Amino acid sequence: MPTRRRFFTQAFISSLVIGGGLSGCSTDPGSVGNKGRKKADPADLPAVIATWKTEAAVTKAAETLQQTGSALDAVEAGARVEEADPKNMTVGYGGLPDRDGFVTLDACIMDHQGRAGSVTFLQDIKHPVSVARKVMETTPHVILSGDGALQFALENGFERINLLTPEAEAAWKKWLETEQYKPVVNIERHDTIGLLAIDKNGNISGACTTSGMAYKMHGRVGDSPIIGAGLFVDNEVGGAVGTGLGELVLKTLGSFLIVEFMRQGKSPQEACEAAIQRIIDKYPEVRKEEIQVGFVAIDKTGATGAAAILPGFQYTLHQRGKLTTADNLPGVMK
Ligand code: SD4
């Protein structure tokens, strides 16, 4: 039960968001905030786009969007599909552990009202995205971390489970033989999932969930749960999500940057490419090492874009009633 004090704080913050005349609350798909952009074609809405070949998740999100009309419900439902799938070794249950053998999860969620919630370094909970949503909806905070996030999850009825599957444990033990830390590019083409959904009225939500880089240092937190880095939504403009080496996304605030590029008039495609180019320009070492970062974005009209440093990035899109996966994108780095 929320304490009285907690309730007041939450109510105060909610009133700031809802009553504060946030221009991002527009529900008219024609009222696009970005300069000179096309008017929305109603047929492009609703839509769901996600990183990688994540058809089951995107299908679930699209179905949820159809059933509930809520982009927020849609991105949460889609993220939960990957979190529950032990075959996806970069997300949730079955995720590869850190170097000490602990599966630690990062996730966040953001909605069309500009609300955001996040959990970092969370252990033993299968659906961090749902805990992040609870943080967003029931606390005055944005991020809960580690033991505090776990305590909050348990208090809110989330079940404690062992996330380390025999397959992930075996892979970790094999890694221990050499202990070489090298982020893998385009890992199995089925990786951290970031989803963006836009409802039929043009309201956008996003979610991102991951177990982070395999064999990371214990306590490491990546970009995925950080609002502005792994995910950003501004309902006036659009949304973006990232995947890949989180340190580079954190240092360039990639998702925020993409949304700001779209606000300045770039298309989602141009904005994603510009954010990738920013990484390449600022961190030229990516030219020598096989480091991957990818982004997908959607704008207020339902137009989408995607770009990555290296070839091989993929995204999955549900739009106009059709599910498509864009395979083997070319990569921005020449
Ligand atoms: C991280 N960005 O923790 C995540 C990992 C990832 O595809 O996206 N892998 O750095």
Image (tube, rainbow, N blue to C red):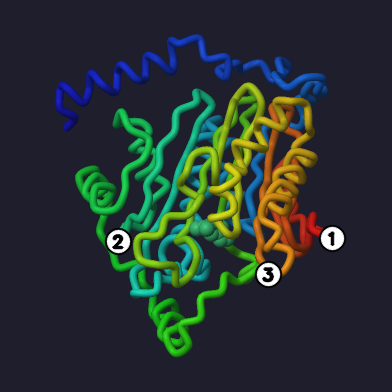
Amino acid type at circle 1 is Lys
- Which image quadrant for residue 199? top right
Relative vertical location of residue 21 with respect to residue 59 in this rendering, above or below: above
Give left or right: position of 219 versus 24.
Answer: left
For the C terminus, give its image quadrant. Answer: bottom right
Residue displayed at 54% across by 43% down: 229
Q: Considering the numbered disc 1 on the image, is that residue within a helix, a strand or a loop? A: loop
Measuring from the top left, give residue 293's x and y in whole percent.
65, 56
Quadrant assignment for ligand 1? bottom right
Q: Which mark is residue 62?
A: none
Q: Look at 49% across and 39% down and name the residue there.
A: 227
Specify the farthest residue to the bottom.
Answer: 177
For residue 334, the mark is: 1
Residue position marked by numbered label 2 in the rendering: 124
Q: Quadrant of residue 291?
A: bottom right
How far from the left and from the top, in percent, is residue 249?
58, 50
Q: Residue at x 46, y 47 (%)?
A: 225
